[in-house]
Image (cartoon, rainbow, N blue to C red):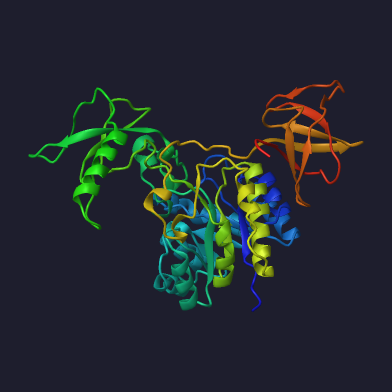
Amino acid sequence: MTLKSPELLLPAGSLDKMRAAYDFGADAVYAGQPRYSLRARNNEFRLEQIAQGIAEAHARGKKFFVTSNLIAHNDKVRTYLRDIEPVIACQPDAFIMADPGLIMMVKEKWPETEVHLSVQANTTNWATVKFWQKMGVSRIILSRELSLDEIEKIRQECPDMELEVFVHGALCIAYSGRCLLSGYFNRRDPNQGTCTNACRWEYKTHDAQVDPNTGEALASGMDKGFDFAQAREEADSQFTSTCGSGQRHPKADQVYLLEEMGRPGEHMPIMEDEHGTYIMNSKDLRAVEHVERLVRIGVDSLKIEGRTKSLYYVARTAQVYRRAIDDAVAGRPFNPALITDLEGLANRGYTGGLLERRPANDYQNYETGNSVLHRAHFVGEVRGFAEGMAEVETKNRFSVGDTLEVIHPSGNRQIRLEQMFNLEGEPVQVAQGSPVRVRIPMQGPVEGALIARLLQV
């Protein structure tokens, strides 16, 4: 059986990231106007950049999708058609949308416009796919809450509809990203593009008692944090000795109070029995090992999350998932080295999400809210090359004696850094972080290369 190669779709928070995505293997990118997409921050795509991006993409035979997937309030409905008209005139390949009213308005005024239904619309079954197909939507970006078997069932029931699936990037604790935390804490609504990632913050948990008259959670012993580890150990011991299989854990109905580190003294009641402090911090999605199954299912597009991520992130993920797709289509076995390559990105721990059913604690990172470097650290970009010397603009510190990885569209390679010079030709031992420029000896293709310092080889 000949397998169709799915589209590899990468995020673009800037024109440079768009170009890197294409250079390293993407077939398409998605970007959006800050006012109408869910990335108002770290987003350079105003109308001029959108027009330039679309022109460059089409010149390269690539696709450019415009993300317009906010859940609109009345004020943005009022201005939407006016603001989107010049974008439509740029002829993007499709709009990614979530709001039914905005989709209706676009299809009524510009019926030939391609619309892809955003993951924000939470499509979890084949009947919903058929509904949106009747509404004129040409592609469905499926909910992240689906298993591989569920995706396959939707493919079988909807053989003539394009399906897109997220395979890498940040996950949210809220259903397909429709989060309320940021809006509650900071009046910055994630569904309007201004998420503050409140689910990544550090929280303390405290034991609580419930007022029998009002049901209100009351603090008990708030002078010290609740020792979750000890309580969990005691409860597990009790559960093992007294409860049979399938019965409810004795701590399951306990009420706790949540205290965010930046808001000491403000206690929010929660129902949670886990043992860490970052209880709402999901691990990052990594489904590179499931690409072959998704290709066999017949998914049309594999999507990577991360419009606010770095150029290095875009290049690395594009390169890895391009190889995974090409291997799957060619019938080659999965290459475990691709997993190692993804460890070169800062991450919060990886999970296959709900694509495969796993123990509940696999999905959450209970130890830390910040990303951790496991294999490599992005340290620079090659800005020029002459007489065997690459001029590198540094992003992070590296030194003579380090092992560097040269990441290039033609292939990656490792070098041992034996010498380094400043722009005046003087030898230096250490390249400080941005914005320093240094020259290092390098052979082979280097134009456009990214440099990473390997933490372990």
Which residue does the image show at 67% across and 48% down from the upper left?
A: 315
Q: Position of residue 58 (x, y in %)?
A: 72, 60
In the displayed structure, does residue 5 sit left or right of residue 194? right
Image quadrant in which you'd find residue 150: bottom left
Q: Is residue 66 above or below residue 266?
A: below
Asked whether the viewer can see residue 427, the reply is yes
Q: Position of residue 28 (x, y in %)?
A: 65, 58
Image quadrant in which you'd find residue 296: bottom right
Which residue does the image show at 78% across and 35% down from the upper left?
A: 416
Image quadrant in which you'd find residue 357: bottom left
Q: Residue farthest to the front?
A: 241
Q: Is residue 98 above or below residue 201?
A: below
Q: Position of residue 363 (x, y in %)?
A: 42, 49
Q: Is residue 157 above or below residue 122?
A: below
In the displayed structure, does residue 188 sit left or right of residue 216? right
Quarter of the image where the N terminus is located: bottom right
In the displayed structure, does residue 193 sit left or right of residue 426? left
Question: Front-most of 239 and 342?
Answer: 239
Asked whether the viewer can see residue 113, the reply is no
Q: Residue farthest to the right?
A: 387
In the displayed structure, does residue 107 sit left or right of residue 364? right
Q: Is residue 49 above or below residue 116?
A: above
Which residue does the image show at 43% across and 62% down from the upper left?
A: 146
Q: For the image shown, how many numbered marks are present on the structure?
A: 0
Quarter of the image where the C terminus is located: top right
